[in-house]
Image: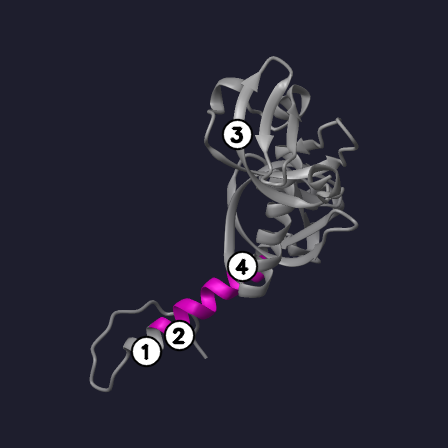
Amino acid sequence: EEYVDIVQPGHGQLLRGTIIEARSDGVLVDLGLKSEGLIPLSDLERAGKRLREYTAGDDIEVLVTVQGHGAKNPILSVYQARQHQAWLDAEALMSSGEIFTGTVESSNRGGIIISYQGIPGFVPASHVTGVTRGLSEVERNHVIEQTVGQEISVRVIEVDRERHRLVFSQRAAQRATREKKAEELLADLHEGQVLSGTVSSVR
């Protein structure tokens, strides 16, 4: 009766469990609720993982994709658990204003794509450094295409998990970097200090 009355983990619930064993059909996990969950082999492959990477006794974070009923084990996912954490990290990154550096994976007419912990992030063309209003469409596309394969710094400006929308800005990151350098310079300056500089304009 106690076993039957135990509350089964619900769909979409994020849990921490202990690996019982890695077997041919996936990884069996002790959820601490008198219930064992199974991470299917297909989910491991989607996450880019292999069975031999999992050892009995190790802790693991999983997300419940199918609630267990009766003798059926709940179905778990390490891939979705990782995605869930990635969205939380993206939200924290936006709140803190910290800069993220990543490699541009692809481009299209609208902008460029950079992945953040497996989540594709979009940098609109208007937020790409070097894309100015005076450029023709051909020149604009050329600037965008040239960024593919490059490592650039960006700042998160929008996170919408429900719409799977993650938006970055390279311009905002550069502006933040300039402001930080200016603050550091002003903090170090003092009266009577002798410095070397470069003439920027003559008026």
Q: Magenta stretch?
A: 171-184
Give the main secondary structure of the magenta stretch: helix
Residue closest to the eye, 113 or 96: 96
Asked if marks 3 and 2 touch (Cβ < 8 Å), the reply is no
Residue 173 is labelled as 4
Q: Secondary structure at mark 2?
A: helix
Asked if marks 4 and 2 touch (Cβ < 8 Å), the reply is no
Residue closest to the eye, 192 or 24: 24
Q: Disc 3 or disc 4, which is closer to the eye?
A: 3
Residue carrying label 3? 19
Which residue, as the protein is rendered here, is positioned at the far front?
A: 1
Which residue, as the protein is rendered here, is positioned at the far top?
A: 24
Q: Residue 55's x, y, as percent?
A: 46, 24
The residue shown at (53%, 22%) is: 21
- Mark 4: few/some/many CA within 10 Å (<14, 14-19, 20+): many
Q: Is residue 50 left or right of residue 201?
A: right
Q: Is residue 51 left or right of residue 3?
A: left
The residue shown at (68%, 21%) is: 42
Q: Secondary structure at mark 3?
A: strand
Q: Secondary structure at mark 1?
A: helix
Residue carrying label 1? 187
Q: Is residue 195 left or right of residue 30?
A: left
Asked if marks 2 and 1 touch (Cβ < 8 Å), the reply is yes
Q: Type of residue at label 3?
A: Ile
